Image (cartoon, coloured by chain):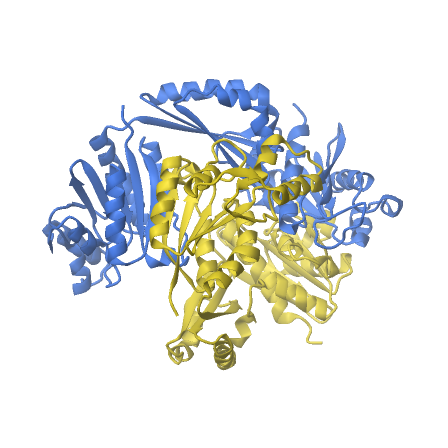
Chain colours: A blue, B yellow
């Protein structure tokens, strides 16, 4: 079984100038990957003939499939079609069927067909037309010496419809592609290098057709297993048995196996267990509540929060005892424990969580440098507090403290 | 004045597999364009030595500057460093200064330095170290025959800090790029097309070497003037006189002229006027407070907030009258006015602001569809409420309602 490899070529100055983020190529990578086609390179070039021709030639050397997006508009700065005609050395002629489709498209929208739009139906004679169900510029399918080039519009919904309905099925048929299976494993509460050491032996034991990748982001480390083989079901079973072997080593840190972030997973757990939560957040300043409330339906378990940012407010609105604040300060274990207990009692929820710390850049003391944060979890069985030493960056500290508090809750939710 | 051209090389399977959207290269394109450097190509390759080496060689042929991100992690799938050592044919040795920095980084977080992290301080002897203020993997600056290669981490906040503080200034110095002056004009409370109509004549009057770009984002429209020439001072003066001509046309919507977002500008105004604010937010669920508290020093004017997400909490914790809620509902003018007045009184601040609405997807009624939001502003002189009809998307509604509330405050702050 040989690997079928593809390259993506995005054409357009707007991408090089950073006027738009190229989300097309990410979507296409997933679509191809799910079809067992491996993307080995992505290239973006501007609306410049020489650049486009060079990129096409380089891609043809390396890949079996070259997917091109952009540069198909009706205006003069759109060069993809003439470049492809030049590259495959064939003339551009009016494509009668394409002309009917473009005419229909305009008619259905009660708009008249201008000459400039009419010209969009003219195609290189050496390509097959790929119908554009969502727009006016047809796609083009070229096949030379077993290598396939497909040109598609850059407009995302036009390209996606074309890929899903026509291009991907035709590629699978043309190349009789292998099976591929991706499995995410999401961890929180451990750094990349510490995780790597914990699972080093497991990683060494992976068969050669299953690859592991570390995808760290702020507050979590994703692991991705990619399995390549003949049969998707076999790969799925192999991957799942590998995960079973991973659990004894890193199970405490694993919170999920899909695209759902921690706040969604915690929302599901709270809903299952019919538990409600309230938040008292000082240094996270609303961000922790925002994580909860960004999830649709969160009003079922997140009842509310208080942000006692000011020292006085901690006493007046939340009820933290003046003695506690005077004796230990706002960033201390006794204060955070009171905060978590008080918000749970005031809001009459099953769970109370709290944060208080020095987000920075100001407010630090020799004993409490920037990044010193206390977090706490409280339910009817227990109250637990934890001290964190985070970074020097305010926004990073806000994010990390919020994730750590969600994780503290994850670790202490009542079993039943 | 010759054109300095750059290429971006992104390294990592996660991009080719479509596991992440590459937002780095878009950010870098803008940063380079602002420095008068044109990006002519973007390439993404996987964690494969041969692919990386080929991509480096191709880029060196075409560009003056090659910026590389990704593949600098401590784990085995990270190949950028060994590939660069091989490409420039020099060995990797422990870099004492980098080692000190990595050690400090871990110490400041109270974590022990593992061998795997220690190795991140080992660098090719033919490169200059670029300090990573936000993480453990140092950047690398190579200069060969006047062509510059810079390798940076793929973690966005680490790369951005490195680019802003070190790489871009050093590139400008090294290549003595042409004079370019960018002037932002930031507006809120008006849509792109309405703004365009208001300033159409002014736009027509712009000289050919000064270009205008509309940069709409969620809740605001940025205008960017880009002036290109020999002398920066001249460009600056020309641009400023153009802005004076713009003010009579769009002044009411302009809140700033730099990178500072609305929450920072409002923080400055509150500080100047020595005013304090408290927030009662329901549908925005903590995000409005997060905007305030994301600003360093915000504790001087933002005293705190309450998130009465649950119906009961609106009465019990904030004190909204049951009659008001029963008669008009939580999403109504009488309720939002009470919320703004109550939070101002409870938190003893000069200003109270409030939000209540249907963020969606659930909770809609025939009279109150998803996107219906009430916002209010209250000070000792006045209380004003406004009804918004926003989108069908939850996250967009949370963002837009928060920005609109900041703008309502901007419009009604006491003059003195």
Front residue of B64 and B259: B64
Front residue of B217 and B153: B153
Q: Is residue A304 left or right of residue B76?
A: right
State which quarter of the image contains the C terminus of chain A: top right
Name the spot of residue A324 as percent of width and height, x first: 86, 43
Q: Is residue A65 left or right of residue B58?
A: left
Front residue of B346 and B237: B237
User: Is residue B23 in sight in this rendering?
Assistant: no
Name the spot of residue A136 as percent of width and height, x first: 22, 54
Residue at the (39%, 79%) spot, across then down:
B207
User: Is residue A79 in sight in this rendering?
Assistant: yes
Residue at the (27%, 51%) spot, across then down:
A153
Front residue of A60 and A35: A60
Corner quadrant of residue B407: bottom right
State which quarter of the image contains the N terminus of chain A: top left
Does residue A2 lie above or below A23 as drawn?
above
Residue at the (51%, 61%) spot, across then down:
B219
Q: Is residue A282 left or right of residue A292?
A: right
Name the spot of residue B7 as percent of width and height, x first: 39, 53
């Amino acid at each position: 079984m040989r690997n079928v490899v593809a390259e993506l070529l995005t054409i357009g100055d707007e991408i090089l100038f950073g006027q738009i983020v190229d989300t097309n190529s990410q979507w296409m990578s997933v679509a191809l990957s799910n079809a067992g086609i491996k993307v080995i390179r992505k290239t973006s070039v501007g609306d410049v003939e020489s650049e486009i021709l060079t990129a096409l030639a380089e891609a043809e050397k390396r890949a079996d499939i070259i997917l091109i997006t952009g540069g198909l508009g009706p205006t003069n700065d759109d060069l993809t079609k003439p470049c492809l005609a030049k590259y495959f050395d064939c003339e551009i002629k009016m494509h009668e069927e394409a002309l009917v489709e473009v005419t229909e498209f305009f008619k259905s929208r009660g708009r008249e067909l201008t000459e400039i739009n009419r010209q969009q139906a003219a195609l290189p004679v050496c390509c097959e037309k790929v119908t554009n169900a969502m727009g006016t510029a047809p796609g083009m399918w070229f096949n030379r010496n077993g290598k396939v080039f497909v040109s598609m519009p850059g407009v995302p919904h036009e390209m996606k419809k074309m890929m899903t309905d026509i291009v991907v099925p035709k590629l699978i048929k043309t190349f009789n592609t292998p099976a591929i299976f991706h499995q995410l494993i999401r961890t929180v509460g451990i750094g990349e290098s510490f995780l790597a050491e914990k699972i080093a032996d497991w990683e060494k034991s992976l068969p050669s057709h299953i690859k592991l990748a570390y995808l760290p982001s702020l507050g979590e480390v994703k692991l991705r297993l990619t399995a390549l083989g003949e049969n998707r079901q076999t790969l799925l079973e192999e991957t799942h048995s590998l995960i079973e072997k991973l659990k004894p080593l890193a199970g405490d840190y694993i919170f999920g196996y899909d695209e759902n972030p921690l706040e969604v997973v915690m929302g599901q757990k709270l809903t299952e267990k019919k538990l409600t939560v309230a938040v008292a957040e000082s240094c996270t300043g609303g961000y922790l509540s925002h994580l909860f409330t960004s999830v649709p339906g969160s009003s079922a378990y997140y009842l509310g929060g208080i942000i006692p940012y000011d020292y006085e407010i901690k006493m007046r609105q939340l009820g933290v005892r003046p003695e506690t604040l005077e004796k230990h300060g706002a960033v201390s274990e006794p204060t955070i424990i009171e905060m978590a207990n008080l918000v749970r009692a005031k809001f009459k929820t099953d769970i109370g969580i709290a944060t208080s710390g020095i987000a920075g850049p100001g407010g630090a003391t020799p004993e409490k440098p920037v990044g010193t944060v206390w977090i706490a979890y409280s339910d009817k069985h227990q109250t637990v507090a934890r001290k964190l030493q985070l970074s020097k960056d305010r926004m990073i500290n806000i994010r990390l403290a919020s994730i750590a508090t969600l994780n503290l809750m994850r670790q202490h939710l009542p079993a039943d």
